Amino acid sequence: MSKPRFYVTTAIAYPNGRPHMGHAYEAIATDVIARFKRLDGFDVRFLTGTDEHGLKIDQAARAAGKPPKAYVDEMVAPFQSLHESLGISFDRFIRTTDDDHKALVQALWQRMAANGDLYLGRYEGWYSVRDEAYYDEGELVTGEDGGKLSPNGAPVEWTLEESWFFKLSAYQDKLLALYESHPEYIQPTSRFNEMRAFVAGGLSDLSISRTSFTWGIPVPGDERHVMYVWLDALANYLTGAVATGRGSLDGEWWPADLHVVGKDVVRFHAVYWPAFLMSAGIALPKTVFGHGFLLNRGEKMSKSLGNVVDPAAMVDRFGVDRLRWFLCREVAFGEDGSYSDEAIVERTNADLANGIGNLAQRSLSMVAKNLGGVMPVRGEAGETELRLKEAFLSGSEAYFTAMNALALHKALDALMAMVAAANGYFAENAPWALAKTDVARMAEVLAATLDATRRIVILAQPFMPGSTAQLLDQLGVAADARDFNGFNMPVNAGTQLPAPAGVFPRITLEG
Ligand code: MSP
């Protein structure tokens, strides 16, 4: 039987600066979901990349004194190497300057035009280059100096130019009907409510081309215009749905199951994107999940505050799996969250060194020392084993429910409850004391502890791919028994285990 498919994407980042922790966070969370789905038996396609056209990139290239293409070619490198150091298991890193993408966006435009949804007019209104977004007067806020700012606090400028428009206003009812029939389309619920209220408030037609600069995809049939960067950018998900060959509007992976994006760009994905697709007669993605913002010690990361942290340096300092664990465990997925060196040290020492690492290390080293490293036979389940089993049944069920609901932090709560139950079982049965009094019972306790550890490590894989692979090696788990099908397949008694080595040493703030 063929596997069910799952197509997941991140937002594509603007390469007008170096990647920051917000980019790392989004890539990690999406990677966790992709890995979870693979272990759960899905055939997964995972798309990520960079958003390289538009005025913001054009201006950044000018400031750097480079032609825009040369500029983005240079700027994309740290994004690609960050993905590597974060262990992001993407299938394609798309760049919107890729040829197949340009061809696809032009085909998309033509389909929207053929449907009668595009017309030529004049745009007169506010535009924010930083947000790459048009705003109505009523949406603007007043800055500290009395100037007008976008709702994201970005400067806006009055813009007046000839433009192609998309009849977004004609899609208000269709969008409201979509939200009504598919409330799962926008998650979490707080963002759903926000978007529904926004659309219910009325939609103006959308300017989708510009003539005052040239760094973009030309409008087919009217090459004085380049396309609005968000039309170009959103279409990356369609381009990426084609696994081989040139961009086709009927990519075999479409529709996407999940677009993971930050809360500041939910509007584009929840309003503009489905409207463009409806216009072109293309199926809609199933879910847009808007995650929260990552804050540095509770403060917004910004160049002016000087608190923009290089995620690659964090990987060097803490190790990739500690960083991945921390971000998914500490930040409620969907809400804003904060990081600091202290919190990372404290959290990972508690969960990984004292929790999972300790459990594995203590049981594995006792097996090595007392049983020649041979996996012992499990005994008849007594009262403590039954309690452990209960805790694991409810813990694993909570884990799967949370993962399927994209509540990554809740899945880790459930996993840590399993760790506590396993450590409790170990302490209660005190196998180190049994070593002197009842070696057969000690072996049973170690067998049960190792099996509990194996289950925990299997479920931890999406979060910490590297260290869990090492632990599964030490636990003697065969390569083909590591997915969720293998969850109920204990390691055979008699299996010779390799010499154990600590995987999660304690760390200190001093490094
Ligand atoms: N290029 C657009 C997205 C186009 S998607 C078709 C963009 N780029 S971005 O580089 O500004 O942001 C990329 C992603 O990172 C977005 O989902 C954004 O919300 C997210 N984040 C940017 N700063 C963030 C934090 N501080 N915390 C968490 N995510 C943040 O928007």
Image (cartoon, rainbow, N blue to C red):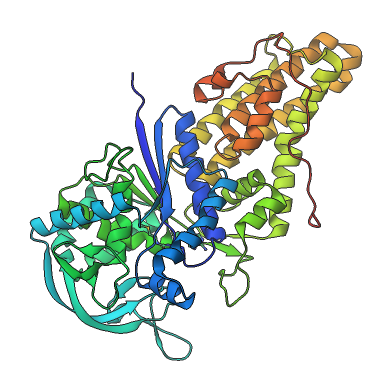
Name the quarter showing ligand 1: bottom left
What's the residue at 19%, 74% (across, down)?
A: 163
The part of the image, by quadrant, that contains residue 305 is bottom right
The answer to whether residue 416 is left or right of residue 281 is right
- Of residue 111 and residue 21, the one placed in the foreground of this image is 111
Q: Quadrant of the N terminus?
A: top left
At horizontal 25% and vertical 81% (from top left) the residue drawn is 125
**Residue 156, relative to residue 199: is it above or below?**
below
Q: Position of residue 110 (x, y in %)?
A: 14, 56
When asked about the image quadrant of residue 461, the answer is top right
- Outermost residue toward the bottom in this view: 146
Residue 35 visible to the viewer: yes
Residue 88 locus on image (x, y percent): 52, 44
User: Residue 441: image x %, image y %?
Assistant: 80, 12
Q: Is residue 166 at least partly visible in the picture? A: no
| Residue at x 46%, y 63% (from the top left corner) | 15
Taking depth in this image into account, of 138 and 212 the one nearest to the observer is 212
- In the depicted view, which residue is nearer to us: 205 or 158? 158
